[in-house]
Image (spheres, rainbow, N blue to C red):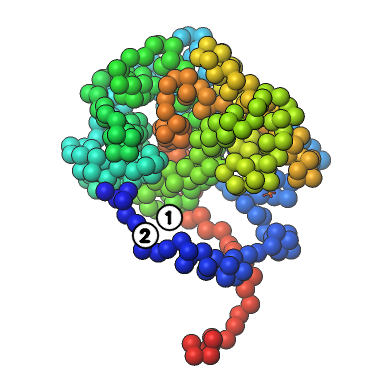
Amino acid sequence: MSANYISPISMEAISSLCGELDKNNSISKSDFARYHVKRGLRNEDGTGVMAGLTRICSVEGYYILDGERVAKEGKLFYRGYDLNQIVANCVKENRFGFEEVIWLLLFGNLPTEEQLASLQEVLSVCRALPDDFIEDMMIKHPSKDIMNKMARSIMCLYSYDENPDDISVANVLRQSLQLIAQVPTIMNTAYQVKRRAFYGKSMYLHPILRDQTTAQYILNQTRSDKKFTDEEAKLLDIMLMLHAEHGGGNNSTFSTRVLTSSGTDTYSAITAGFGSLKGPRHGGANVKVSKMLSEIIENVPDPTDEGQLKDYLIKILKKEAGDGLGLIYGMGHAVYTLSDPRAVILKKSARELAYQAGYEKEFRTLENIEKITPGLLCEFKGENKEICANVDLYSGLVYKTLKLPEDLFTPLFASARIVGWCAHRLEELTSSGKIIRPAYKSVSKTRDYVPIEKR
Ligand code: COA
């Protein structure tokens, strides 16, 4: 099994080379300013460099007044519709909304009842994976990481497509719908294979039922007894709606657009999205929040006490605790300043569910992190910057109350965000036609080559 492979390169040997590598690669932050290079494609005030135009989504977290960035409550619009309204209407009408969001994001308008039914039908018939795929590509090659397995599976699907490289809109739309339907199947299968291979537990691969919404399908597949309530499915449906799309500039969507602009195939472009989303500063943050929360609860006698929690968060920022990267996960955002509208919606559900399910301490700790971090980060960094809780702060707790395992937190995000990636790939293909190719200024001096015996 690939998991038993031991690298022939020893960490001891490689570590001794890192000093040399660091010395020759480091570029000071002041050089970025000197050459007017926008680190992280960010302007000096933290706003993003304008890299494209889109009709799909608008992410709003500040406005510009007299050239200054002014903080405001966050807003998120899918094709011009406020996400709050989309979610509120589905709740009011007591119906599922993720499929409506899929239609809206891909095609640009709210679907009629017939259109929605036809989309539901297409997704239902596309959920299955090709014959032998599960055995040959998934069971035989388990991975400890579900995002890794999902990315590999998407790449493998290229070989099962009769027309993989055709980037006409019709073909890419066909591939997009298929992938949107198949990704939850891939996610669950990868998880079940992991259960058997790494946890020594049973693997459940339930038959695929027709006429289930994506949320119902996910709960049906991931639970050994296939049982779930309508309330649980509707909550997961909201989670999928909230995670479906976030503008062209978010790291995974931009990665998908970058690959798309080279003219590459759908499988390669979507795999880039998976690779990016897995990162802890992006979608991988939901797992990191969960680990950070457990660590805090284990080490802080009363994490709901501001003083005690603050001391521990300082340790995290100083890289003396946490994962050593100095980040308080679930806090901060590249665009949002005062609030992330997704986190606001989520927090309401998280509070209710956490109290019902006995996770009150977890919820109150997260709320305390949300309260303390903005001021703490300003003190720590010495700059006055507004930061707020992001979507990942409370999402893990909601998944936990839905009995969804930590292994699936980021994959669930991906199962929703694939819709945004596909919509942006289609938009890039139909509206840009120019390869994305920014420039890097070299800060190396030219040198004469030194023959090997003289080094
Ligand atoms: N913990 C520690 N430091 C943080 C932070 C956090 N939660 N949020 C921001 N910062 C730091 C940044 O790293 C940056 O430091 P630098 O100037 O030394 O590079 C500084 O504060 C200003 O950051 P800002 O411009 O506001 O944010 P960003 O766009 O660089 O980063 C995130 C945005 C989301 C990557 C960042 O807030 C973060 O890493 N958050 C934690 C991970 C997370 O929850 N990600 C999910 C996002 S939905």
Q: Nearer the viewer, mark 2 or mark 1?
A: 2
Which residue lies under the disc numbered 2?
A: 7
- The tally of labels here is 2
Res. 420 visible in picture: yes
Q: What residue occupies the far right of the structure in this picture? A: 66
Residue nearest the viewer, comparing 98 with 18: 18
Disc 1 marks a residue whose amino acid type is Ser
Q: Quadrant of residue 70 in the image?
A: top right
Which residue lies under the disc numbered 1?
A: 262
Q: Position of residue 37 (x, y in %)?
A: 67, 59
In the depicted structure, whether residue 8 falls above or below residue 172: below
Secondary element under disc 2, as helix, strand or loop, is loop
* Quarter that holds the C terminus: bottom right
Res. 85 visible in picture: no
Ligand 1 image-quadrant field: top right
User: Nearer the N terminus, badge 2 or badge 1?
Assistant: 2
Disc 2 marks a residue whose amino acid type is Ser
Q: Residues within 10 Å of mark 1 (few under 14, many from 20)?
A: some
Contact check, label 2 and label 1, Cβ < 8 Å:
no
Residue nearest the viewer, comparing 427 with 158: 158
Residue at point 64%, 70% (across, down): 443
Q: Quadrant of residue 316 in the image?
A: top right
Residue at point 48%, 87% (across, down): 452
